[in-house]
Amino acid sequence: MIVCRSGPQGRFCFLIFVFMWNRISSTLYFLVVFAAALSTSGLKSQVVVLSNSSAINSALERAVNTGEYTLEACIAQALNQNIDVQLSMLSQTQSEMTLDQSMLNFGPDVSGAAGQFYQSGRSIDRFTNQFVQSTIGSNNFQLQGSLLLFGGLQNQNNYKQAKENWLASGMDLKSMQLTVTLQVSSAYIQYLQANESLIAAAQVLESSTLQLDRGQKIFDAGGSTQGALLSLKAQVANDAASVTNAENVKATALQNLKQLIRLEYHKPFRPVNEDLGIISEPFGYTASQLIDTILFKRPDYQAAAYRVAAAEFGLKSAKGATMPTLSVGGNLNTVYSDNAKTIENVTVTGFSPVGRVQGTNAIVEAPEFAYSMKTKGFGDQIQDNFGKSLGVNLNIPIYSGLSRQNQVKTANLAVLRAQLNMDRIQQNVQNEVLSAFNNYQNAEKRYASNLENKNLQAQNQQYVKQRYDAGAASYFEYQLALMASSAAHQNYISAKYELTFRRLVLEFYLSPDQYQTSIIPTQK
């Protein structure tokens, strides 16, 4: 410890310390803030997603005003209200606060202290050199500060670790937004499928109702039997039951979608029947191309990569704790005591003999004084008792129960754990992509076969209907053709929307940012 105390030399050292301390601390703080500002401004775009947020918010605003929700508005509403998304936003905010704090750790540490003390009892009066019984009050004031010059690069590595964790929290938010987006898209497509199935069932009911009206007229004219008429009525009742079932499925899909986007029950909600586009076009990617393209776009994989980097900086910081630290510090202090007295109003009251001069035997007299004592002023004591110190401290860790070495081992395990987690996520992404691609291929084949079956069954139904109208086919034959055509149409609807969803999943994986927003959760 190198210390400069009070006095002329101490005052000179203190002035040098104050000047250098201000220069060093302000320069370091400016460099840290400037570098952090540059890096943070460039990284904000990686964490906060701003993909057409104004257009999405306007779509949501129109939906709230009209009650008609597009898929885009449903996704915006869900991201705005989903609890998991809001929790991810809070985690990101907390990570940002940790990053800001790690940035401020580069600055100096300054603290002040003040105390009021009372001492009661027997003490020696320094003016009379006699014991006195008194109560003495005193004040202590102190201002101290320190600045770390070298600490094994712990602050630098802690800042880099906090930055990587902050980036990882942003990717967690994007991953949660993607999950919610896929859930809403699936529910929205299920509603569209239920709605189209209801329309198809209603068309079949309308057709069978027309056949019943025609059959009733023929029966009234005596051209058919009662059994044929009852068959027509049974078919109408069966088709009406199918419509009722389709209405229930549609109502359930609507309610599920409304609950998923967390829209209040009393607010109007009418999903818009959007155009699905051309889903029969080839997708244009192979499975290996999808894996190579999607892997580095997946937010969960990016978050895992950031956490590996954060763990590596944590390991460097733990190793830095085993190195010596060098810091500079200073102290300003002063005291006040009501026992500090000054002498005033001194007058000579006389003379008294105190001895004789050797040789001449002359009497030596000394004057006698009268005086009064007064407590020294607060400002004067603060100034007279002012002290300062400056020191440089070098701390070399030698032995602390192997705690630092164990911290290094723990940090090393954290790196291995983060790497294994990233490998697991990579494997999961590959499995998900392969599964999604296989599901898409199967859905594509199912859609093509059901499309062909629907067209052929519709042609067959029209052909049998023409024969039935001409009297060349029985009603039983027509009924079988009608039921086969209706079933083929329902299967086609199911295959079409399944293919739509399977393709939408792959498109989400390829361009996740396209479906993300920066919507702030509503505070309740």
Image (cartoon, helix red, strand yellow):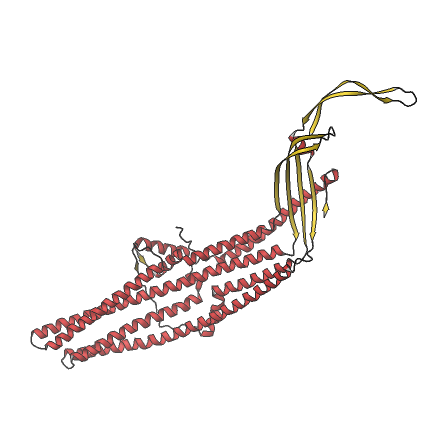
Q: Position of residue 504 (x, y in %)?
A: 39, 67
In this rendered view, identify the residue nearer to me: 32 or 165: 165
Residue drawn at 39 percent across, 75 percent down: 441
Percent from the top left, x then y, of residue 265? 31, 55
Residue 293 position within the rendered picture, expressed as x and y whole percent measured from the top left? 48, 69
- The answer to which quarter of the image holds residue 77 is bottom left
- How far across and how far down the image is residue 145, in percent? 64, 45
- Please name the residue shown 56% across and 54% down the image: 38
Judge from the rendering whether residue 35 lies leftward or rightward of residue 220; answer left or right.
Answer: right
Q: Residue furthest top?
A: 350
- The answer to whether residue 55 is visible is no
Q: Is residue 171 above or below residue 498?
A: above
Which image quadrant for residue 348? top right
Q: From the viewer's perspective, is 203 left or right of 175?
A: left
Apparent side of residue 67 relative to residue 523 in the rendered image (left or right): left
Q: Residue at x 50, y 69 (%)?
A: 424
Q: Residue furthest left?
A: 221
Residue 506 visible in the shown view: yes
Q: Quadrant of residue 501?
A: bottom left
